Image (cartoon, rainbow, N blue to C red):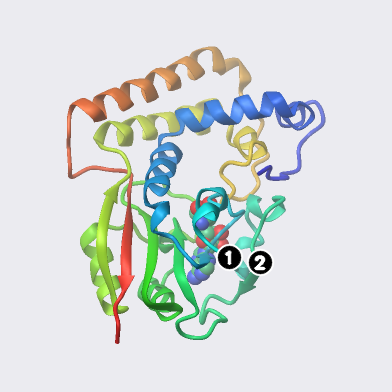
Amino acid sequence: MATSVPVNPGSIGSLLTRAPALARVARRTSDWIDLAWWTLERTLREVAPRAHGRLLDVGCGDKQWEPLFLPYVSEYLGIELEGTFTRTAAAGAERGPDLTYDGKRLPFEDASFDTVLNVQVLEHTPAPAALVAELGRVLKPDGVLLLAAPFSFRLHEQPHDYFRYTPHGLRVLCVAAGLEITEVHACGGLFSLIAHKLNSYLALRVARIGGVAQSLGKLGHEDPTRVRARLWTLPVVAPSMLALSAAARGLDGLLEEPDETLGYVIVARRQRA
Ligand SMILES: C[S@@+](CC[C@H](N)C(=O)[O-])C[C@H]1O[C@@H](n2cnc3c(N)ncnc32)[C@H](O)[C@@H]1O
């Protein structure tokens, strides 16, 4: 899933566009280091077998999760909010939404879908209760909502970044929408959280490789970045990031802290009327 962010000829982004094998290795390495992506992907993979029938991905972006869910569903439809999506880097990707809407009412009849997916979208709407009510409305009775929302994450996609979520807040939103939460999964623990924040600082502020990440199909939700990377910092920054990620994975497994995480994935079921 390559995001086609405009790249300067001679830049590292342009090199990656011309060398797909190198881009694949760089993308895999960056996914391993990026603990927010890695913990979310691992958790979505775990809950993916709950998906079935017709799936609607609300706020799908460049549909980066489609390959995880396709084996379990008969149809995968993605919808986006027109006003915000068109300004993100993901808008130039090969894959994208099947349709867009104005963010008020999803253009589907009640009870149209067996599964609704909503990944890292709820923090971007100023009216989360209204969005969760819409997610519940288009679900069939006993249909499944798979929703991911951040608990602690840096500001992003500004100014459309409004809230962070606890499992208790998500439960309140779900109950009001006729949904019962059946599973809550934390995406990483305390050490992933700390390491991810340090790595974001090193990558985005010190080495300034946000644009490189976008040419690998990452950070698709942000505006296209054209800041020049400080490649001369990489001999120190890259091994530091690798070491932080490796240490966090080990420490999260050894020392449990149930009150800290990067975010949550919940599974909820549409209750029968
Ligand atoms: C952080 S991105 C996540 C994209 C995708 N779900 C993913 O995980 O890669 C948030 C997306 O939510 C979309 N969005 C924000 N409010 C929305 C709404 N009310 N309905 C649908 N999409 C919305 C934005 O346009 C943006 O593409």
Identified at 41% across, 49% down, the residue is 44
Q: How far from the left and from the top, in percent, is residue 166?
A: 25, 57
x, y percent for residue 6:
76, 43
Disc 1 CB within 8 Å of nearest ligand 1 atom: no
Res 98 label: 2
Q: Is residue 264 visible?
A: yes
When the figure is inspected, residue 178 is found, relative to residue 9, above or below; the finding is below
Nearer the observer, 133 or 220: 133
- CB of mark 2 within 8 Å of CB of mark 1? no
Task: Tell me the residue at 38%/60% (across/down).
Answer: 147
Disc 1: which residue:
75
Q: In screen coordinates, is 180 left or right of 233? A: left
Q: Is residue 101 left or right of residue 104?
A: right
- Residue pictured at 45% horizontal, 67% vertical: 116
Image quarter (top left, top right, bottom left or bottom right) of the N terminus: top right
Kind of residue at disc 1: Glu
Q: Position of residue 101 (x, y in %)?
A: 60, 75
Question: Is residue 265 left or right of 114 when viewed as pictured?
Answer: left
Residue depicted at x 65% and y 70%: 99
SS at mark 2 in the image: loop
